[in-house]
Image: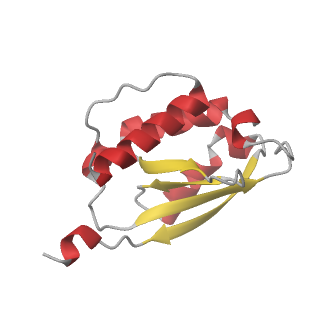
């Protein structure tokens, strides 16, 4: 499986796990943008006041968060996302026209609204590594 295919499978399986819904997707704008060097925004999710201490991500109340992320992915707004393997939070790479739009996307996340997660937001310049050796 290619690196692109591996990422797509990871995102799909992560979202399916969080939402409890099988993911069946055709090619989306997000997938075609994976090699796009334009800036994106990185949302880093960390435990908030409502995070259930001592519980892994799979036992946190994140079903609505998963649905929200799936919606962003299907619209082509979210390029990739997933939880950290140590259950300390997660991250999402999104496309937005401005920092304000990216902040609005993060603030509308049900897990942020419920205070399960707090977040850090960073503009992120992606390096087109695949094109570097050509």
User: What is the residue that sits farthest to the bottom in this orientation?
Assistant: 133
The one of 99 and 60 positioned closer to us in this rendering = 60
Coordinates of residue 1 in the picture (x, y in percent): 28, 45
- Decide: is 122 above or below 95: below
Quadrant of the rendered structure where residue 8 is?
Answer: top left
Q: What residue lies at 64% left-to-right and 49% top-to-bottom?
A: 107
For this view, does 47 lie left or right of residue 31? Answer: right
Q: What residue lies at 55% left-to-right and 35% top-to-bottom?
A: 68
Coordinates of residue 89 in the picture (x, y in percent): 68, 53
For this view, does 48 lie left or right of residue 43? Answer: right
Coordinates of residue 91 in the picture (x, y in percent): 57, 55
User: What is the residue that sits farthest to the front in this orientation?
Assistant: 1
| Residue 61, visible in the rendered structure | no
For this view, does 108 lie left or right of residue 88? Answer: left
- Decide: is 124 above or below 80: below
Q: What residue lies at 28% left-to-right and 44% top-to-bottom?
A: 29
User: What is the residue that sits farthest to the left in this orientation?
Assistant: 134
Q: What residue lies at 48% left-to-right and 62% top-to-bottom?
A: 41
Coordinates of residue 70 in the picture (x, y in percent): 48, 35
For this view, does 36 lie left or right of residue 66? Answer: left
């Amino acid at each position: 499986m290619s690196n692109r295919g591996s990422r797509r499978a990871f995102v799909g399986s992560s979202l399916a796990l969080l939402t409890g819904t099988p993911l069946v997707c055709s090619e989306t704008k997000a997938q075609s943008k994976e090699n796009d060097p334009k800036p994106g925004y990185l949302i880093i999710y960390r435990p908030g006041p409502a995070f259930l201490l001592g519980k892994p991500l799979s036992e946190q109340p994140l079903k609505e968060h998963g649905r929200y992320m799936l919606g962003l992915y299907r619209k082509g707004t979210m390029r990739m996302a997933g939880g950290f393997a140590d259950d300390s939070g997660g991250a999402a790479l999104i496309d937005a026209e401005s920092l304000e739009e990216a902040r609005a996307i993060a603030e509308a996340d049900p897990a942020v609204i419920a205070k399960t997660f707090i977040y850090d937001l960073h503009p992120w310049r992606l390096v087109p590594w695949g094109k570097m050796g050509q």
